[in-house]
Amino acid sequence: MNILILGGGGREHALAWAALQNPKCDRLIVAPGNAGTAAIAENVRLDMADPVAVVNFCAETAVDFVVIGPEGPLEAGVADALRQAGVLVLGPDRAAARLETSKAFTKEICDAVGAPTARWARFDDAEAARAHVRASGAPLVVKADGLAAGKGVVVAASVDEALAAVDDMLGGRFGAAGASVVIEEMLEGEEASFFVLVDGTDILPIGTAQDHKRIGEGDTGPNTGGMGAYSPAPVLTDAVAARAIDTIVRPCMAEMARRGTPYRGVLYVGLMIADGAPRLIEFNARFGDPEAQVLMMRLGAQALDLMLACAEGRLHGARVNWADDHAICVVMAARGYPGDHAAGEAIGGLAGLGGTSSEMVFHAGTALRDGRVVSAGGRVLGVSARGGDLSAAAARAYAMCDAVDWPGGVFRRDIGWRAMAGRG
C-alpha cells in the first residue's frame, strides 16, 4: 500500500521508519519530511494544513493511508477532508481534536464525566484572571487555551509569576490561541505519558513513556519540547493504566461519542500520578515527540498494523505484542535551545550510525545542504536505542551521541534517571 505521513520532525521519521519495516508498505511518502526521512522515503513539498491540497495529492499519487503527525493539520480539518474523500486516515476529525486544541474543552469533558483532573477556571478578561490568581495563591499553572506551539504553559511558583503569565497570554503573545486562558491548580506527583488508540468505539493501550521537558540535567532550567524519553514508564504500572482507562479515558471517549464527535486516532494521555492514583494533565490528539521515537523502537513493524486497525474501525480484538525490552531517546539540540540558537551547522559521523532495530538516529530539525546534513531547528536529532533493560538501552544511545560529530550539539546525560534510580 502507498502511505503518506504528514510532518517533518523526529516523530514523523520514527513513524516512517516503523512503517517501512512492515511488508504492507510499498511506497512511503513524507510531507515535508527532513534529511532523515529523505534517506528512507520520498520527501514532497505539500501544505499539510491545506485539506484540499492533501486530498488532491492523495488522489494523484494513489495514497491508501495517511498518518497525521502534528496537531496543525488536525485543527485545519485535514482528517475530516480525507475521510470525506474515502481515504483511510489516522487522526481525529477537527471537532474531536478539540481535546488538544482547546484546554477548556477538555476540562469541560472531564467535568461532564467526573474524570479526575486539576481544579480550573477559564478567563478571557485579564482583570478577572488576575483576581482569581490573587485569591488562589501559588503555585498555579497558566495555559493559553488554544495551540501555542508547545509554549503556552507556565508553571508559576509565585503569584507574581502567574500574574505575568496572564498578562503575557491575554496581552496577545500567542494571538488567537491566547485569547482566553485556563488557570489550574498545580498537581503533585510524577508525570507520565499513556498512549492509546481509539476507533470511536474501542480503546487499545499501546504503550507508556516518560519524557524530560527541562533543558538541564536533574530536570533544571527552562522547559523545552522534550529533551528525551524512555519506555516503558515504571510509574505507570498495569494497575495505574487500568485505573486511567476506567476513570479517564473510557468515560471521556464515551462522552465524545455521546456528543456526536467520536474520537478516532491516537490519544496521548498526559497523567500526574500520586500514590497510584492518576489525574489528567492534558490530552493530545497525536503521538508525542520524543515519546513516539521510543514507542516505535519497541513496536516496530506491528505499529503499522495497529494504526491501520484503528483507522479501519477494527480495534476490537487487536493486541499489542510487547517484547520484554526498554527503549530510550536522547535529544541532541542546538546550543542555546530553547532560546536563540544557530542553524545550518554541519553534522557529521552519522553514516553507518544506527540503522538497526536496536539503534536509530531519528532526525527532527535537519536539512540537506550540498549533500551534507545540517541543523535546521532547535531539537535536531533523537538518538534512540533498545536494550534488555534501561541501562543497556541508555549505554547504546549515549555511545551513539558521542559518535556524532557536531560541536554545536548539546544533550542531557541523565535521560531515564528516575527509572534507573528506582524513582519511577
Image (cartoon, rainbow, N blue to C red):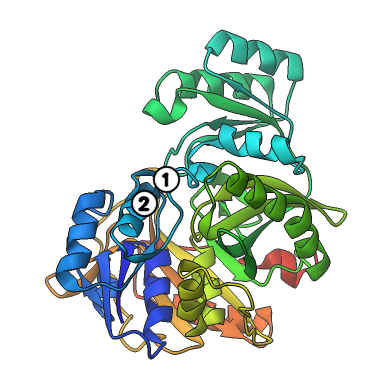
21 or 397, which is in the foreground? 21
The reply to whether callout 1 and callout 2 are in contact (CB within 8 Å) is: yes
Q: Position of residue 1 (x, y in %)?
A: 31, 82
The local secondary structure at tag 2 comes to helix
Of pointers 1 and 2, the one earlier in the residue sequence: 2
The numbered disc on residue 66 is: none
Query: Pointer 1: what residue?
Result: 94
Extreme-left residue of the structure: 370
177 or 187, which is in the foreground? 177
The residue positioned 61% from the left and 86% from the top of the image is: 387
| Mark 2 residue type | Asp
Query: Which image quadrant: the C terminus?
Result: bottom right
The local secondary structure at tag 1 comes to loop
Is residue 403 visible from the viewing direction of this image?
no
Q: CA distance from mark 1 to mark 2?
A: 7 Å
Q: Position of residue 162 (x, y in %)?
A: 62, 24
Relative side of 243 to 281, left or right: right
Relative side of 137 to 406, left or right: right
The residue positioned 32% from the left and 81% from the top of the image is: 349
Q: Residues within 10 Å of mark 2 (few under 14, many from 20)?
A: some
Query: Pointer 2: what residue?
Result: 80
When asked about the image quadrant of residue 391, the answer is bottom right
